[in-house]
Structure formats: structure tokens, C-alpha cells
Image (tube, helix red, strand yellow):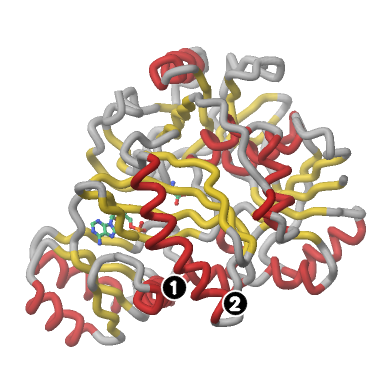
Amino acid sequence: MNILILGGGGREHALAWAVMQNPKCDKLIVAPGNAGIAQIADCATLDIEDGSAVVDFAQDHSIDFVIIGPEAPLAAGVADDLLDAGFSVFGPSAAAARLEASKAFTKEICAAAGAPTADYGHFTDAASAKAYVRAQGAPIVVKADGLAAGKGVIVAQTVAEADAAIDEMFGGSFGGAGAEVVIEEFMAGEEASFFVLCDGTDVLPIGTAQDHKRVGEGDTGPNTGGMGAYSPAPVLTDKVAQKALDEIIKPTVAEMARRGTPYRGVLYAGLMIEDGAPRLVEYNARFGDPECQVLMMRLGAQAFDLMQACAEGRLAGARVNWADDHAMTVVLAAEGYPGAYRKGSPIRGLRDYSDDPFQMMFHAGTAKRDGEIVAAGGRVLNATARGATLQEARERAYAQAASVDWPEGFYRSDIGWRAL
Ligand code: AMP
Ligand code: GLY
């Protein structure tokens, strides 16, 4: 089969790495890809948020199957355009991807499905939002309704902090995403991510993970896209996972189908778990980045078979071959990230892991310049490994990270501390 992956981060490198191991894959193109992806697949320049451009490209290159990595093309309806043109697609329609693109929509679905989540109010003006905060008290969580690249959530410890966040959102600092604001009850507990394939009707869990969103050691400092992750998440025991499936995910999938907008693709449920009870924090309509890296490390080649079964509505008959292993990824980021950082610094000492089934250096933001790999983003590399235990995976991942010669980069040294 000829397969096209849309995206160019560490998530897409991990997807490409898994797909390439599957004997069904004859040819793989990744758009736009990056310097690491270019070592295993063809990379192409393409506006991946332009549905008709993607359809034309897929037709020109005789593509059989398209995997959509990031949320922006999903929200833009690229899956719809590909389906209309007759392609097999892994990734939800724009209507189904609203589970990520609108927090108010997700809350409405949870209410209709009876799925446990934080109590909330939904506001279109600052005065009523502030009145709600006064009535509820702090801590309280203020969220821009739309896609804000992970930056539209403020966990306010005081009423004054919540007021400032409300002013900022309605003041336009999140653009259109902040024109509507959701204010939520603060949920205590431990967070974990649950990844479930959905084909519109049936669901298949494919793994759990925990990531570290803060930039600094001990989970301190500003939020990032994620500085590392590990799988499985110990807090998501089989019992908690079953509860999340029965109380949150299956009712959501049923409600989406009932509305005529069935969810097809991977549903990433961010859960808050307290005393064995999961509540929904948020949905994402895609794999997490860097959570995808640890999921793909554990699933390997079968990941493609599962994505294909998902796209073709065959999940009822699909199963995962679990290896009962653990995986960890450590993000190497450019000095300054998540604030301003410099691009273009050379990265040396990258080893070739192509023959090693236990580890891989995924590239998140790299480019090739004058024959050399250089940093081209904030999150740049993902040192990823698996092992029989989390400790073993951790040792491999950190040995990999330490072997890179990149003075302008940094990484956290405590990924997985909660689980170890
Ligand atoms: P979100 O983008 O909705 O995942 O929010 C980003 C982060 O904010 C989450 O990963 C949580 O750590 C935190 N968060 C969001 N909503 C809540 C909530 N209702 N209670 C506590 N923490 C929250
Ligand atoms: N690592 C968090 C996310 O992908 O949303």
C-alpha cells in the first residue's frame, strides 16, 4: 500500500517508524516531515490544512491510506475531503473533531452522555464569567473555548487570577479561540491519558500514558507541549480503564453516533483520577505528542493494522498483541523553550538505531542544512526506548539523550518520577 502521513513532528516520526515496519507498506510519504523522518520515508511539501490540495496530492501519488497526525487539518475538515474523494483515512471528520476543537461542545456531549467531568459554565462576556467565578470561588479553571495550542487553560489559584485570565481571553490574547470561555470546577487527583480507537461504533483501547507538561524538574515552571512521557500509566489500572470506557468513552461514542457525527479515529481522553474514579479533563481527536512516541514504541508494526481496522469499521474483530512492556520518551528541547528559542544550532552525535527494536531517536523539530542536522523547533528530539520494566526503558532513553552532542539543547532528568 501507498501511505501518506500528514504532519512533521515527533508524533509523525513515531507513526512513520511503526508504519514502515508493517509489510503492508510499500511506500510512505510524510508531509511535511522533518530531517529524521526523511531518513525512513519520502518527505513532501504540502499545505496539510488545505483539503483540496491534500486530495490532489493523494491522487497524484496513488495513495491508498492517509493518516492525519495533528489537530489543525482535522478541524479544517481534511478527513472529510479525503473521504469524499474515496480515500481510506485514519482521523475523524471535522464534526467529530469538535470534541477537541471546542471545549463547550465536549461539555455538552458529556452532559448528554452522562460522562463524569468537572462542573462548568460557558460564557460569551467577561462580566457573567466573573460573576460565576465569584459564586464558585477558587481554585478554578478558566479555558478558552477553541484550539489554543495547549495554552488556553489557566488553573487559577485565586479569584483575582481567574479575573485576569478572563480579561486576557476576552481581550483577544487567544484570538478567536478565546471569544467564548469555559469555566470549570478544579479537579484534584492524578492525570493520565487513555488512547482508544473508535470506528464510529466499536472501541478498542490501545494504551495509556502519562506526560510531563511543565518545563522544569519536579513538574514546575511554564506549560509546554510535553517534556516526556511513559506508558503504561500505573494510575490507569485495568479497573480504572474499564470504568473510563464504560462511563466516559463508550457513552461519548454512542452520543456522537446518535447525533449523526460518528467518531472515527483515535480518541485521546485526558482523565483526572481520584480514589479510583476517572473524570474527563479533555478530549483530543489525535494522538498525543509525545505520548504517541511511547505508544508506537510498544505497538510497533501492528499499529498500522489497528489504524486500518479502525478506518474500515472492523474494530469489533481487532485485538492488540500486548508485549507487557514499558516505554519512555525524553524530549530534548531548544534552550529557552517554551519561551523564545534559537533555531539552526547543529546537532551532532546522533546514532543510528534502525536495527534496534528497543529504542529510537524520534525527531520532533529538525532540518538538514549543509549536510548537517540542525534544530528547527522548540521540541527537537525524542529519545525513546522500551524495556521489560519502566526503569529499564528509562535507562535506555536517558543513555540515548546523554549521547547527543547538542550544547544548545536541554532535557528534564526526572521523566517518570511519579511512577518510579
Ligand atoms: P486541557 O488543555 O483541557 O488538557 O488542560 C490543560 C491542563 O490543565 C490539564 O492537563 C490539567 O493539568 C489542567 N486542567 C484542565 N482542566 C482542569 C480541571 N478542571 N481541574 C484541574 N486541572 C485541570
Ligand atoms: N502531550 C499533550 C498533547 O499532545 O496534547
Which residue is more in the foreground, 407 or 57? 57
Classify residue 105 as left or right of residue 280. Answer: right
The percent coordinates of residue 407 (x first, y second) are: 45, 21
Task: Give the distance between the C-alpha atoms of the residues marked 1 and 2, in whole angstroms.
Answer: 15 Å
Q: Amino acid at mark 1?
A: Ser
Quarter of the image that includes the C terminus = top left
Which residue is more in the foreground, 87 or 258? 258
- Crowd around label 2: few <14 · some 14–19 · many ≥20 (10 Å): some
- Crowd around label 1: few <14 · some 14–19 · many ≥20 (10 Å): many
Element at label 1: loop
Q: Which residue is mark 2?
A: 261
**Residue at position x 74%, y 29% from top?**
39
Element at label 2: loop
Quarter of the image that includes the N terminus = top right
Compared with 406, 74 (above or below) is below
Q: Which residue is mark 1?
A: 102
**Residue at position x 35%, y 72% from top?**
114
Evaluate whether residue 79 shows in this view. yes
The percent coordinates of residue 325 (x first, y second) are: 50, 24
Q: Which of the 4 image quarters holds residue 351?
A: top right
Evaluate whether residue 339 shows in this view. no
Compared with 404, 261 (above or below) is below
The percent coordinates of residue 329 (x first, y second) are: 47, 29
Classify residue 297 as left or right of residue 21. Answer: left
**Residue at position x 46%, y 27% from top?**
328
Q: Which of the 4 image quarters holds residue 299?
A: top right
The percent coordinates of residue 141 (x first, y second) are: 22, 64
**Residue at position x 55%, y 68% from top?**
97
**Label 1 or label 2, whichever comes before in sequence order:** 1
